[in-house]
Amino acid sequence: MDIIDGKAISEEILEELRHDLAGSNHGRAPSVAFVRVGEDPASISYVNKKQKVAASLGIESQLHVLPVEISQEDLIKQIDLLNQDDTIDGILVQAPLPQEIDSNTIFNRVNPEKDVDGFNVVNAGRLCQEDKEGFLPCTPAGIVELLKRSNVETAGKHVVVLGRSLIVGKPAGLLMMRQHPFGNATVTICHSRTKELAKVVSLADIIIAAIGKPRFVTEDMVKPGAIIVDVGINRIEDPSRKSGYRLVGDVDFDRVAPKTSLITPVPGGVGPMTVALLMKNTIKAYRKNIV
Ligand code: NDP
């Protein structure tokens, strides 16, 4: 069993992006605007991390914090202002949004050419059409990079994705099945209505777990030698920690890992890749914007 070191691979990507940016001079740095609604601690921490990594690459970022009680109309107005600002290349509205706000309406309001999160309907459509102009959602694109850079052959493999969200499961399945050297897999997507889920998962050569349930995938569900990408980020109580909690994935890592050939840890697997791929999308948006 080997561990896929997402931290190391993400640093490799960031280094490539740094190098790429150093070779270009277009009069101004790339820029990204983050919109955060409310004070959800996980969202605060994710946006902080993204801003820190952006700064380390010389990407300018701005943060717009809006009150949790903001109306959908006012949030749309804020996005329109960012859409109209030519000096902003990328816009990211941090999910989850308050329940009263329709996330898809907000994602679709972001100018598709600034949609560095890849959740806009235009970019979702481009993904379906396998159009390279589009922005791929960062977490699924990060999963592909992890597999690619770990020399995992996906063509003809059976990939089982757990979860069908717009953010992870659905696009991860689409990427795995696309006609591409790092796609061409046979994909099964499972969700809360899937019957005999354990049996389906046990047929997988590659498992992508993205359901948000701590240690849901147990060793009896996993075929010997399978490859696992664990997307889940779940807080569980841990009185031995100062914070009182620790992060675990959707896979029961300690018991499952010995049965696999390759597995991502949590933390240090998919998480850092999501941030690295966001930076890649931001630079892509910048290049499109400055020409
Ligand atoms: P969502 O809650 O949007 O989606 C969860 C999916 O899992 C749904 O499709 C749901 O099915 C399915 N599901 C839930 N419970 C079960 C079950 N018991 N059996 C089968 N399927 C089930 O979550 P996200 O996709 O946004 O996130 C998933 C996980 O990934 C979370 O832990 C999140 O924190 C993490 N995450 C990590 C990122 C990273 O960078 N590492 C980035 C984004 C997310 P149904 O559709 O039927 O309800």
Image (tube, rainbow, N blue to C red):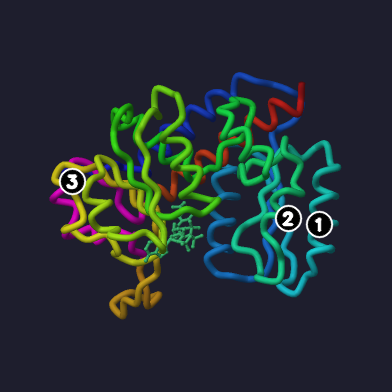
Q: Residue, x 70% and y 21% (percent of image)?
A: 25
Residue 105 shows which numbered tag? 2
Q: Position of residue 28 (x, y in %)?
A: 75, 30
Q: Is residue 262 magenta?
A: yes
> Is residue 37 shown above or below 57?
below
User: Which secondary structure, mark 2?
Assistant: helix
Q: Point out the tag, 1 or 3, that comes first from the N-terminus.
A: 1
Report which residue position mark 1 lands on: 76
Mark 3 crowd level (few <14, some 14–19, many ≥20, 10 Å Cα): many
State the extent of the magenta-drawn residues as a range. Answer: 247-268
Q: Point out the tag, 2 or 1, that comes first from the N-terminus.
A: 1
Separation of marks 3 and 2 at Cα, in angstroms? 40 Å
Dots 3 and 2: beta carbons under 8 Å?
no
Where does the N terminus fall, quadrant-wise? Answer: top left
> Is residue 242 shown above or below 221?
below
Residue 58 shows which numbered tag? none
User: Which secondary structure, mark 3?
Assistant: loop
**Mark toward the viewer: 3 or 2:** 2
Find ligand 1 in the image and state its quadrant: bottom left
Q: Where is residue 187 in the image (x, y as percent from the top left)?
A: 37, 40
Instruction: Indicate the quadrant where residue 99 lies.
Output: bottom right
Q: Point out the tag, 3 or 2, that comes first from the N-terminus.
A: 2
* Between 154 and 67, the one nearer to me in the picture: 154
Q: Residue, x 37% and y 78% (percent of image)?
A: 244
Q: In this view, does 206 lie to the left or right of 7?
A: left
Q: What residue type is labelled 1?
A: Ile
Separation of marks 2 and 1 at Cα, in angstroms? 9 Å
Report which residue position mark 3 lands on: 260
Q: Which amino acid does label 3 sit on?
A: Thr
